[in-house]
Image: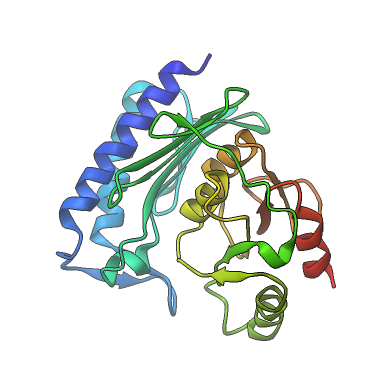
Amino acid sequence: MWEKELDIASRAAKEAGAFLRGTFGKLIRVDKKGRIDLVSEADIESERIILGFLRESFPQDEVLTEEAGLSGPKASRIWMVDPLDGTVNYVHGFPFYAVSIALREGDETVVGVVYDPFSNEFFEAVKGEGAFLNKGPIRVTSTAGLQEALLATGFPYSIREKFQPVMKRFAKMVYNAQGVRRPGSAALDLCYVAAGRLDGFWEEGLKPWDTAAGALIITEAGGIISCFDGSRHSPYSADIIASNPLIYRYLVSLIAE
């Protein structure tokens, strides 16, 4: 049903990813949007590449991107684009970053792609059709206990203002889980849960372009997502819990304490 949309999103993500791979370690200009929030020339060019694909193929759609914000006509369909998720990693030469593109129709995400240019791993999902990594099906883990679970998280850009509650949640997870990682790209963290490399993920202070694609990929891989309080998650939610169905209730419980 969304074959053209998936094709265009895939081509846009891969072309933008090829650019990012080619400029990795060669950046000239990096600016600050906040105290620890960076934007590079790579973010801007990757976004330009993706917008070119979307505006040419779907001029009737609205587009929300991290750097340019909202553009295009007001519409029931909106593309959510993160041209470089993991900018801080990218700037420092840490090879964990991605391109994320999702399409929302009404209140549902129907197409999501996340491309890791460094590893050449392409995650994709269409609503109702399953989740895939490089065309092979993926599934969340069947880990049943938190003590056997490997989790991931990220820290918000407002970490200095929210240090105590953020670190309290982090400490509880470290104490109860087998391990916790903090890789630095929410889009890839979500895809790693979908692919069974992680059992769960939580983070706050997120934006729509951070989670729209990855959340669809997780649910299509059999996982569960919600807000910290267990309520229904949307890309506009500021926090997210994502995991396999077996440890989900433990994560919600720990965060709610």
Q: Quadrant of residue 100?
A: top left
Q: Position of residue 13 (x, y in %)?
A: 33, 38
Q: Is residue 194 left or right of residue 23?
A: right
Does residue 157 lie above or below 219 as drawn? below
Visible residue check, residue 74: no
Q: Nearer the viewer, residue 75 or 168?
A: 168
The residue shown at (55%, 48%) is: 196
Task: Find residue 56 and report its image quarter.
Answer: top left
Give the number of marks: 0
User: How far across and how far down the image is residue 193, in percent?
Assistant: 57, 50
Q: Nearer the viewer, residue 59 or 221?
A: 221
Q: What residue is at 74 percent from the left and 46 percent from the top?
A: 245
Q: Is residue 247 left or right of residue 88?
A: right
Question: Residue 60, can we see it?
Answer: yes
What residue sits 71% from the left and 80% below the top? 165
Residue for point 68% across, 81% down? 171
Q: Position of residue 257 (x, y in %)?
A: 85, 73
- Residue 129 position (above or below residue 199): above
Color style of the picture: rainbow
Q: Position of residue 190 (x, y in %)?
A: 55, 51
